[in-house]
Every structure is written in structure tokens, then in C-alpha cells.
Amino acid sequence: METCDICKKQIDATQEITQRGDKYVHATCVNKTKTALRIDDSQKKGSKRAIKTTGSVITDIDLPWERVLWVSFQFLVVGLVLAIPVWILVMILFAIAS
């Protein structure tokens, strides 16, 4: 049985493991240490955010008109399939109530 190099616990055969150099460690231990290192680095710099993230902006979508119209048609058909039974149920309930 191998022992995790980070938490010093034995590695079970059913656990997810990764190789770190010539040693095997738990995948969760690696994730915890990476997060802790990122937090420590950002705190050393004096920033308020622990983990910096970057975003992206979508400026162009290249879709053919046939695809857009087909999806719109499908949306309308599904809406009708859902709306007609609801409308019938409401009419029945109002007919019983009157």
C-alpha cells in the first residue's frame, strides 16, 4: 500500500490518485494544496481577492439563418404543445366553476 505524500494517509485502491514525481498522492490533496498556494500567494501580494479569474467576451456568432429559423420553429412547436393542454385544463376548470 502506498502512502499519500501530502496527508500521510494510506491510499486505498478505490480512491482517485495522481502521480507527483515518483510518489502517489490523493487527487483531493493536490487540489487542496494548489488552492492553498494560490491563496497564500495572493495574500502575500496584499490583494483582497484570493484567486484572480479572467473572462472572455463573445463579439461574433457565426450561425447560418437556416439553423436559427429551424430552432425558432422548434421552440414555437414545443410552446404550443405545452400551452394547448394547459389552456384546455383552464377552460375545464372555469366551466366547472360556473
Image: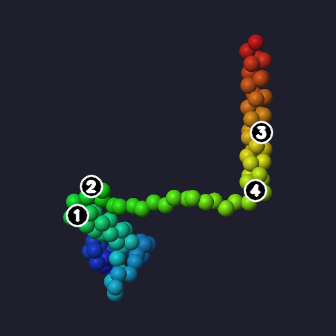
11 or 71, which lies in front? 71
Numbered disc in front, either 2 or 3: 2
Q: Which residue is mark 1?
A: 45
**Residue 65 horizontal side relative to residue 50, left or right:** right
Residue 36 visible somewhere in the drawing = no
Q: Which residue is under mark 2?
A: 48
User: Which badge, 2 or 3, is on the more N-terminal residue?
Assistant: 2
Mark nearest the camera among 1 and 4 is 4
Give how far apart the Cα atoms at labels 1 and 4 are. 50 Å
Q: Amino acid at mark 1?
A: Lys
* Mark 2, other Cα within 10 Å: few <14 / some 14–19 / many ≥20: few
Q: Residue 65 versus residue 28: which sits nearer the camera?
A: 65
Type of residue at label 4?
A: Trp
Q: Amino acid at mark 3?
A: Leu
Give the side of residue 51 with respect to residue 91, left or right.
Answer: left
Q: CA distance from mark 2 to mark 1?
A: 9 Å
